Image (spheres, helix red, strand yellow):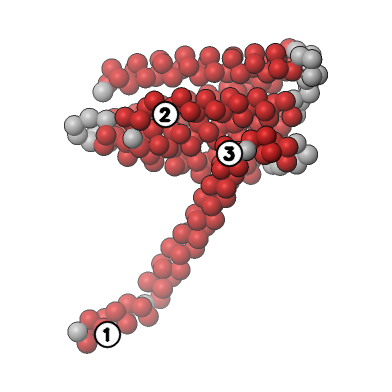
């Protein structure tokens, strides 16, 4: 027992171990702060989107910071869940198959984000209006939150696939945000917003079906 105690004391005094522990604690605290922020923002978006967009209307927010503090952490959680969900997809775990599903998720979320920004910008122009790209990136980023949150659950537990339906709540969040942020007159804004949502999700649905068909063929 004394020898074990002496060895533990020596380990605690080892500069490398002390440095490693300090680094680990720093990383833990940083991740804790990030995901605490993600939790509270996601909760507000999902539980009270009307009030959330009311607060957001007059804010000036860097979309790159928004990606780093909200979208990327949620994306990391989704991809981790999808990879681990490979355990539940069959009788045995296949790292290669899980990586394929992770790749599919990356492609689909990229289509939702970049496709959503591009389609919204082009249709806004076609309707005869103009809007800053930073506003569109904020709108799309926040609207992705419900889909990302649901994807964490369905990625980890694929047999809960029916919960994907609740990811469509993001359309409602987008609609509320677009009414606040896009420069449409009240008389036509809902019609224009519905067209934008339909175009974006049609592209997403087609890509999702095609990728699923490819992956099921490799399952």
Q: Name the mark on residue 6.
A: 1
Query: Dividing the picture into quarters, in which one does residue 51 lie?
Result: top right
Pointer 2 residue: 163
Viewer-proximal residue among 57 and 71: 57
Viewer-proximal residue among 136 and 154: 154
Query: Dividing the picture into quarters, in which one does residue 208 lie?
Result: top left
Quarter in which the N terminus is drawn? bottom left
Q: How far apart are marks 1 and 2 (CA)?
A: 54 Å
Q: How far apart are marks 1 and 3 (CA)?
A: 54 Å
* Residue 96 position in % (x across, y down): 28, 32
Q: Do the numbered discs 1 and 2 sit on residues whose CB atoms are within 8 Å?
A: no
Q: How far apart are marks 2 and 3 (CA)?
A: 17 Å
Pointer 3 residue: 47
The residue at the point 18 percent across, 32 percent down is: 91
* Residue 86 position in % (x across, y down): 29, 34
Label 2 SS: helix
Q: Relative to residue 48, is residue 54 drawn left or right?
A: right
Taking 24 as reference, is 171 above or below it? above
């Amino acid at each position: 027992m004394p020898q074990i105690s002496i060895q533990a004391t020596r380990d605690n005094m080892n500069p490398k171990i002390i440095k490693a522990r300090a680094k680990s604690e720093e990383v833990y605290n940083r991740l804790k702060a990030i995901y605490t922020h993600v939790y509270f923002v996601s909760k507000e978006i999902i539980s009270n989107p009307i009030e959330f967009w009311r607060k957001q209307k007059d804010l000036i927010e860097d979309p790159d910071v928004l990606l780093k503090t909200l979208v990327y952490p949620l994306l990391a959680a989704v991809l981790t869940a999808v990879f681990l969900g490979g355990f539940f997809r069959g009788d045995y775990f296949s790292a290669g198959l899980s990586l394929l599903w992770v790749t599919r998720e990356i492609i689909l979320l990229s289509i939702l984000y970049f496709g959503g920004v591009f389609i919204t910008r082009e249709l806004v122009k076609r309707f005869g209006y103009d809007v800053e790209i930073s506003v569109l990136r904020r709108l799309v980023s926040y609207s992705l939150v419900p889909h990302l949150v649901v994807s964490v659950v369905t990625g980890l537990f694929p047999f809960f696939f029916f919960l994907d339906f609740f990811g469509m709540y993001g359309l409602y969040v987008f609609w509320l945000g677009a009414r606040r942020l896009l420069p449409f007159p009240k008389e036509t804004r809902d019609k224009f917003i519905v067209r934008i949502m339909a175009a974006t999700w049609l592209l997403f649905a087609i890509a999702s079906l095609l990728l699923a068909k490819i992956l099921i063929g490799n399952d």
